[in-house]
Image (cartoon, rainbow, N blue to C red):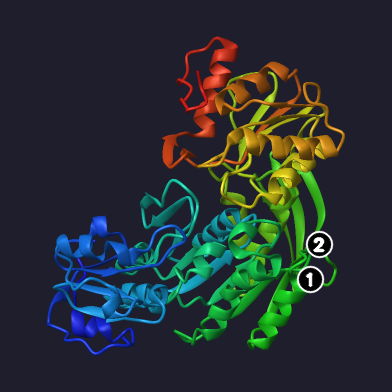
Amino acid sequence: MPKHTISLPKLLESITPLNVENSPDLEITEIVLDSRQAHPGALFVAIPGNTVDGHDYIPDAVKRGVAAVVGTRRSREIPLIPAPYYRVRDPRHALAALSAALYDFPARKLTVIGVTGTDGKTTTANLIFHILRAAQLKAGMITTVNAIIGNKTLDTGFHVTTPEAPHLQRYLAEMVEAGLTHVVLEATSHGLAQNRLGECHFDVGVITNITHEHLDYHGSYEAYCRAKGQLFVQVAATTPKFPGSPHAAVLNADDQSHAYLQDLAEARGLRPITYGLSPQAHVRAEDIRHTPKGLAFRVVGDGFQADFTTALLGDYNVSNCLAAVAATVEGMGLPVGAAQSGVAALDAIPGRMQPIDLGQGFLTIVDFAHTPNALRRALQAGREMTQGQVIAVFGSAGLRDRAKRRLMAQVSADLADLTILTAEDPRTESLDGILEEMAEGARSRGGREGETFWRVPDRGEALRFALTLAQPGDIVLACGKGHEQSMCFGETEYPWDDRTALRAALSEYMGLEGPEMPLLPTGD
């Protein structure tokens, strides 16, 4: 895309510095928060973090020729630097405002649909995107998997989170320049809490559910709800951009967060649009049927009834489809026919209940389920797909919510026939310690180590072992990594893709040519 430039004095109009500083008439071409990316013409924003503080890297940014610096420390608290320094109360708020200003506030020129939730947000975002396209709208999408801008698909990172504000605003600017009018934006709780989504001017907000996840970061379920609820707060703050601009808050009537989110939306002057299986929901599903090609169901809304089909698997995807229909038909006034076509057009989401089939006599599926609720839903879907055994392979991440380790193992002990506990981004924690916590959870539900569950630290070996347990008609579910393409041991990201690894294990098992098993530090 063409390079964006803005004068430093003009850029600073988007924030309110606490100090008076000379603002030379310099041209700013980029906003950076990593000093290694600093260069002449860039403005460096120093962000305090949990483990590192961007203020400590100001000298490095200046050494690389950065044009100006924004931070939260007082000037006397940082080394003297030969560059203008602007102090702000909230550097993350400033980062979002500066990034949007550099690109001339692209979200103000788009209809922005935000989707958040513990589980299902990527699938729901994709469903909405396909409905918008079926309605002949020029739509783009930014998720934790990729960004779709016209005919371009861009990776958004190895590990899942909302892109930082400079990247996000650049994507939005590319969409404006490509002539797009609508964008679907997946919003993580970290992205909302850290204001990465500031200046996104959401017109429609969708919250799929709020279950047990990220409590290591947010501290409590209530705080996690507040972080997710920020999406509705931002929707309420958006002023109409165009005649007929939508303004809607969409929430799950079946979820435990329903009462809190409905009160929040109403307090902010938004009309809540509910969806679910509840008879009281504005958009609800009836007559749900499992077919060889996916799901079929009837959607009943305010003033319409329509039959829907989807290639997606599992009852929980009915909920994701309802969320998309509620957002587009009820929230945006799009035709029901476009919703039917869009839902039917989505074949699969990378790493979401994705079959890996080399002709073996049992099902093997990769899924991103990495929370207790998501694992429960994946295992329930697996049970619907087979009359044989359900074999689950998964781990639990290090330096993250410890409580879910035990909970996930308990879910698998309850719902799977056989469970293999393995590595999943242990980071700097002891993998053996993580697996012991999970084993305790399995034992608490009657699991018997060596009979109904096993610990296999190396994930590749765990997949190989699962295949040896599988009989014709069984299903092997590799959960937790999905579309991700790396795994973290210590502070190093090692190349890893469950889909490649499962193909490698199947190829070995069947004596076929195939990819090599990716190597991890746990391997021999």
Q: In this view, does 118 lie to the left or right of 521?
A: right
Q: Find residue 142 and report its image quarter.
A: bottom left
Identity of the residue drawn at 37% across and 67% down: 47
Q: What residue type is labelled 1?
A: Ala
The secondary structure type at the circle numbered 1 is loop
Q: In which quarter of the image is the N terminus?
A: bottom left
The residue lying toward the viewer, choosing from 217 and 248, is: 217
Q: Name the residue under label 2.
A: 277
The residue lying toward the viewer, choosing from 300 and 321, is: 321
Q: Which amino acid does label 2 sit on?
A: Leu
Identity of the residue drawn at 65% across and 70% down: 223
Residue 293 visible? The answer is yes
Q: Is residue 25 left or right of residue 393?
A: left
Task: Name, please, the residue furthest toward the top.
Answer: 511
Residue 246 visible? The answer is no
Label 2, label 1: how many angstroms apart (C-alpha)?
7 Å
Crowding at label 1, few (<14), some or many (≥20) Cα neighbours within 10 Å?
A: many
Identity of the residue drawn at 34% across and 76% down: 73
Q: Mark 1 points at which residue?
A: 281
When the figure is inspected, residue 235 is found, relative to residue 175, above or below; the finding is below
The residue lying toward the viewer, choosing from 247 and 36, is: 36
Q: Which numbered circle lies on residue 389? A: none
Q: Are marks 2 and 1 in contact (CB under 8 Å)?
A: yes
When the figure is inspected, residue 71 is found, relative to residue 316, above or below; the finding is below
Identity of the residue drawn at 54% across and 61% down: 188
